[in-house]
Amino acid sequence: METSEVNFSQFGISEEEGDKLVAEVIRYILFKTHQNSGCPIKRDELTQLITKTYHHRSLPTIVLNKATTKLSSIFGYDMKELQRSRPSSTNQPRSSQSSADPKSYIITSQLNPEVYRKHVEDSSKSHLTGFTFVVIGIVYLAGGKITEENLWQHLGRLGLSQDDERHTIFGNTKQAVETLVQQRYLQKDKSNGPEGLTLYYELAERGLQATTSSSFKESLSQIVTSEAVAIELD
């Protein structure tokens, strides 16, 4: 979303009232993101929050633009609008199974990954962070797209089964992967081919952002190198 220099007085609202609206939207976004573990927030929710008192058609856009700017400058978050689907890595017909609404948003940290891990990341959730890294790494090494069957074949090498509903760490393992879809680390899609319907995963917004960091690539490189050495020793 682009920022706007429009003043609230143009809508018959004082700057103080407008700033309160922006603050209320920011509080809602931060709380909702924390409450729902980073799942997308629908624009309709934010619009209703803004228009419950003020009914000018253009006001929600102005408030959201200003909220986006403040989230970046004060809190260090990027607010991104999600798309229902992204260009596929193949030309096969597809139908998106994404949980994200075309008018939904997520916020992502602008902090350096090392700084984020040191000062923000919750160490009590390190097992979920590790699981996310592994799944994203598998999809990344597969070229950014992998069939559901192949993903579980790789996870099976780590002792994880999609039929396990009572894993000692992750609980329902299949739901753990679906949570990554809800959080927009992955995007789940399907395509029709000669062999019938195929389900596959691609990297979504958060997953794509994670793979751009040098620390991710360095960590992944170390793991791949160690795996190659282990195979040679065998």
Image (cartoon, rainbow, N blue to C red):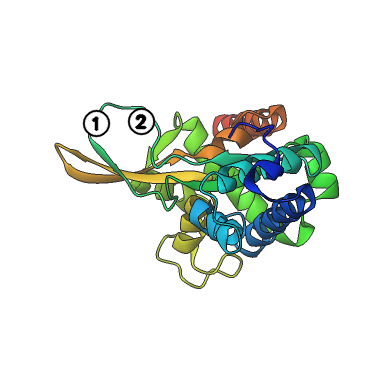
Q: How far apart are the alpha carbons under marks 1 and 2? A: 8 Å
Vertical placement of residue 151 versus 6, above or below: below
Q: Residue furthest bottom?
A: 166
State the SS at label 2. Answer: loop
Vertical placement of residue 111 versus 151, above or below: above
Residue occupied by mark 2: 88
Q: Quadrant of residue 220?
A: top right
Pick whichever, 131 or 97, lies toward us: 97
Residues tagged 1 and 2 counted as in contact (Cβ below 8 A)? yes
- Tell me which amino acid carries mark 2: Ser
Q: Residue furthest left?
A: 194
Pick whichever, 172 or 39, lies toward us: 39
What label does residue 92 carry, if any?
1
Vertical placement of residue 76 versus 217, above or below: below
Image location (x, y in percent) of residue 209: 60, 34
Q: Residue at x 61, y 31 (%)?
A: 2
Image location (x, y in percent) of residue 133: 61, 44
Q: Quadrant of residue 77?
A: top right
Q: Residue at x 51, y 60 (%)?
A: 176
